[in-house]
Amino acid sequence: MIRIERNLGFGGGCNIGAGGGHGEYLLFLNPDARLEPGTLQALVRELEVDPSLAAVGPSIADPAGAYRAASAGFEPSLRSVLGHFLLLGRVPWLGRWFPPLQLPEGSTERRPDWVSGAAMLVRRSAFEAVAGFDASMFLYMEDVDLCRRLRERGWGVGLVPEVAVSHALGGTQGPEQAETWARAFHAYLARLHGRVYAGSCAALAALGLAARAVAYARSRRALSQRLARATIALAAAALTVPPVASTP
């Protein structure tokens, strides 16, 4: 056991744990996630069969059925935001132009841009080559960021949809989980593309989530409230005005 004196966040804690071992592969698994039989073996086999892959993940299912957990998806961008939050990715003749930010249920995609850090098997050599997770990202989007940096180094990312883990989505988080994700999502886009681009994406995402919150208001009240909180957080991020640099 490795004891850490303070909370370093998901990525920082995983980096510490990874540094304490020497195995060829690193398994990152949320404390409230449970591997289904055969899952780990299938993930190892995927890395062994395809040496171009740096990271693989399974399908992720919420055992309570309260939410659809995000197993994998494509890089956050204006196009993937439009495809996911405003559902343009589901329009038959438009879908290929708008890759899904999160893969829809039943997708057969096996080579997404990212897989969830809730259950991820990573090749140690690739993980160390990119210096692991970005520890400055305390919670959320660190898995997307890691996969992006791995891809930039020429590695691939794989999904093995026929095997799964059970993960109570947000099970280790409080009611602020949705807002925390929304802020991390905006910050990730702002760091890569600037605040104007990030604000535009956040505003469009907020619009889509607001529509979902209204649609689920009667049938799935808890989900509707969660979506409403994320909507407010995204809208607030979109309206944030960056400080004006002072002249000497």
Image (cartoon, rainbow, N blue to C red):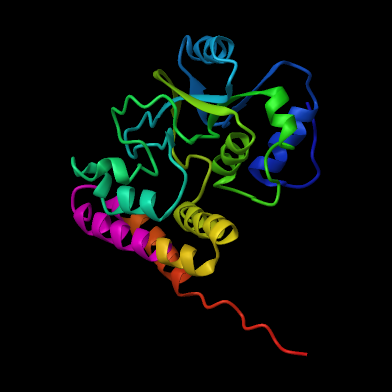
Q: Nearer the viewer, residue 49 or 31?
A: 49
Q: Nearer the viewer, residue 90 or 180?
A: 90
Query: Magenta-highlighted stretch: main secondary structure?
Result: helix
Q: Residue at x 72, y 47 (%)?
A: 7
- Position above or below: 23 against 175: above
89 horizontally vs 46: left or right: left
Number of residue marks:
0
Is residue 205 part of the magenta span, yes or no?
Answer: yes
- Position above or below: 177 against 95: below
Give residue 89's quadrant in the image: top left
Magenta segment: 202-224
Q: Residue at x 44, y 64 (%)?
A: 233
Is residue 174 part of the magenta span, yes or no?
Answer: no
74 horizontally vs 11: left or right: left
Whole-percent x, y for residue 107 in the image: 31, 28
Give residue 210's quadrant in the image: bottom left
Q: Nearer the viewer, residue 46 or 141?
A: 46
Whole-percent x, y for residue 20 in the image: 80, 26
82 horizontally vs 29: left or right: left
Whole-percent x, y for residue 197 in the image: 47, 64
- In the rendered image, the quadrant that contains the C terminus is bottom right
Give residue 188's quadrant in the image: bottom right
Q: Residue at x 69, y 52 (%)?
A: 136
- In the rendered image, the quadrant that contains the N terminus is top right
Q: Residue at x 50, y 11 (%)?
A: 42
- Name the outermost residue toward the bottom: 248
- Position above or below: 230 against 55: below
